[in-house]
Amino acid sequence: MTIQGLNYERLLQISKRVNWRLEDIIGRDKPMDFARPFLPESFARTQGLDFLSPAERLKLNQIRGHGYLAMFELVERCILPMVEDLTQARTDPDPHRAPALAQFAEEEEKHIELFVRFRRAFAEGFDVDCGFIGPVEDIKAAVLDHGRLGKAMFVLGIELATQRHYLDSVERDEGLDVQFKSLLKHHWMEECQHAKLDAMVFFELAAQATPAEIDQAFDDFLDIGGFLDGGLGQQTALDLVALEAAIGRTLSDAHRERFTEVQHQAMRWTFLGSALRNEAFLDALAQVSPKGRARIEEVAPAFC
Ligand SMILES: [Fe+2]
Ligand SMILES: [Fe+2]
């Protein structure tokens, strides 16, 4: 089980070449434009909520943008200890493995700071405070409380999903905020290497696992997904509170219900479905377990 033409040394070289600086993406001279949407409509799904005016839908799009920043900051905080753990679980004698994983961790730390800075810029420019699920440490502990292979599968999926986030921001011109678009692009530029590294580590761990351990990894992966989905449901409620505060009116019960249904599903697609439907992810799963891939494809429609 290998990825053609890939090795740790080559990935490290590419990562060092791609590496960008935070100052190039966000800062005082690069303000966020609150007259524009932040997230592509394919993820925000605000247009179908016809009980909101265009200006209110824009507010919702930006609230969802804030949730995106907070969610990825959280995901990166979960990924960091996983990378450290994988560095210690040395299963491949390649001398470039540890330096490649160290570069990966360094980039994730930079990404955390990227999301923190964007959230700060958001808080300065948006009318109301937006809530986010937590405590982050508790969520992180619950995610990390799974087997190594299942967690490696989760990281591979979510990092590949950032490709769709970037592509959807450029494939249709929706007049997105330039800074947010740049974040999606630059994040993917580095995640692209991470995802390849994830795949190498995933295959490395899978090669040593028994069939029962591989089945367990799929259980763990689905368990992490189900746990996060519960969090997305709670986030939908927090976004509703933020929206009502931002637009200065309370929605009717029927509209709140519709909001919750549409927005929870939109978040499922953003953070889970876009991974479950990623072809590179499904291919990697099939190489390890065709039966496992079939299980994932069976649940995918619920997250799309
Ligand atoms: Fe990242
Ligand atoms: Fe990453």
Image: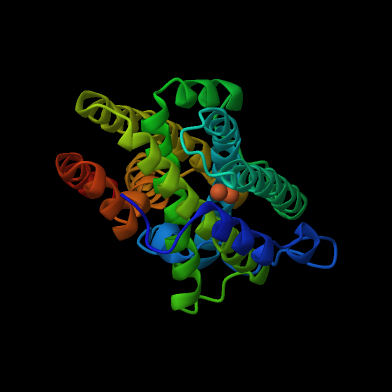
Count the labels in the image. 0
Q: Is residue 14 visible?
A: yes
Give the residue displayed 33% in from the left and 58% down from the top.
Answer: 280
Left or right: residue 209 versus residue 86 is left
Left or right: residue 287 versus residue 42 is left
Give whichever of 288, 275 is nearer the camera. Answer: 288
- In the current view of this chain or complex, which residue is farthest to the right? 28
Give whichever of 162, 244 is nearer the camera. Answer: 162
Left or right: residue 10 versus residue 295 is right
Q: Position of residue 128 (x, y in %)?
A: 68, 45
Q: Position of residue 238 (x, y in %)?
A: 52, 36
Residue 44, relative to residue 178: is it above or below?
A: above
- The colour style of the image is rainbow
Give the residue displayed 60% in from the left and 64% down from the top.
Answer: 14
Left or right: residue 80 versus residue 270 is right
Q: Is residue 248 visible?
A: no
Give whichever of 202, 48 is nearer the camera. Answer: 202
Give the residue displayed 44% in from the left and 68% down from the top.
Answer: 168
Q: Position of residue 273 (x, y in %)?
A: 33, 50
Q: Position of residue 151 (x, y in %)?
A: 42, 33
Residue 8, relative to residue 81: is it above or below?
A: below
Give the residue displayed 49% in from the left and 55% down from the top.
Answer: 7
Give whichever of 91, 218 is nearer the camera. Answer: 91
